[in-house]
């Protein structure tokens, strides 16, 4: 399947991903960045409330431009969405670890270990039985499987050895932040272990939400 993923943005400054041209996952960017894709977007899947995943001004503009868009989320986001102005009729609240048939897609929320309630997604494009796994902002993937999925978008936020090097050299203020990283984000090492255990012969993967602590020589 071609052009399965379009990464609008993937970093701590903003996250937004478009799958299969019509499914947007997270909207933590300016409206100008998503405007070129809006005519095709039918479904918006959200993970958690942090600004780099939900830009409230962008979401308000989005629901004004596309008032019938369906928004998929966990129960922890309902209050925020209603406050923004989303019509409750357009909010589809899914429980974790339960598959939902939503017409073109089968969607399942999977738990993500972060400092706020969060989730990843398993998405199946029914027409082709094409399986997508997407997760970011999680400390681990314990108890989660996605055997032989076609496409993996997986957080590889930092390399353990590089993070440890920075911890030895950083200031006290920086140390407080860096010690938080393994408790809220997935390492390159963890991502690769998961991929090795789950990828099939025809699987494809994409690292997302990488940081400077994934590359030697970065400040």
Image: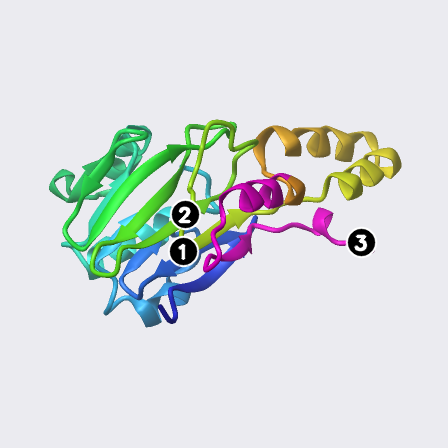
Instruction: State the quadrant of the N terminus.
Output: bottom left
Give coordinates of residue 114: x percent, y percent: 51, 30
Residue 142 inside the magenta-drawn segment: no
Question: Compared with residue 48, is residue 133 higher up or lower down, i.e. above or below?
Answer: below
Q: In this view, does 10 lie to the left or right of 75?
A: right
Residue 212 in the image: x percent, y percent? Answer: 71, 51
Residue drawn at x 56%, y 50% is 209
Q: Would you say 7 lies left or right of 11 here?
A: left
Q: Nearer the viewer, mark 2 or mark 1?
A: 1
**Relative to the observer, which residue lies in front, 104 or 14?**
104
Instruction: From the image, tell me which residue sits under label 3.
Output: 216
Q: Is mark 1 on a helix, strand or loop?
A: loop
Write down the residue under mark 1. 150
Q: Which residues are the magenta region? A: 190-219
Q: Does the magenta stretch include residue 213?
A: yes
One can see residue 26 in this view: no
Q: Name the residue under label 2.
A: 133
């Amino acid at each position: 399947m071609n052009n399965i993923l379009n990464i609008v943005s993937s970093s701590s400054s903003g996250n937004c991903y478009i799958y299969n041209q019509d499914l947007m996952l997270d909207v933590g960017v300016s409206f100008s960045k998503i405007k070129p894709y809006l005519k095709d977007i039918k479904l918006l899947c959200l993970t958690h409330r942090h600004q780099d995943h939900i830009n409230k001004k962008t979401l308000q503009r989005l629901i004004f431009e596309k008032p019938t868009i369906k928004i998929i989320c966990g129960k922890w986001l309902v209050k925020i969405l209603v406050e923004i102005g989303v019509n409750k009729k357009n909010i589809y609240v899914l429980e974790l670890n339960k598959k939902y048939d939503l017409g073109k897609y089968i969607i399942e929320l999977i738990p993500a270990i972060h400092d706020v309630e969060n989730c990843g997604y398993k998405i199946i494009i029914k027409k082709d039985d094409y399986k997508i796994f997407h997760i970011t902002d999680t400390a681990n993937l314990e108890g989660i499987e996605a055997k032989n999925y076609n496409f993996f978008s997986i957080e590889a936020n930092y390399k353990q050895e590089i993070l440890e090097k920075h911890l030895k050299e950083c200031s006290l203020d920086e140390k407080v932040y860096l010690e938080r990283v393994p408790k809220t984000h997935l390492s390159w090492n963890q991502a690769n272990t998961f991929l090795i255990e789950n990828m099939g012969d025809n699987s494809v993967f994409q690292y997302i939400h990488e940081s400077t602590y994934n590359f030697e020589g970065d400040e």
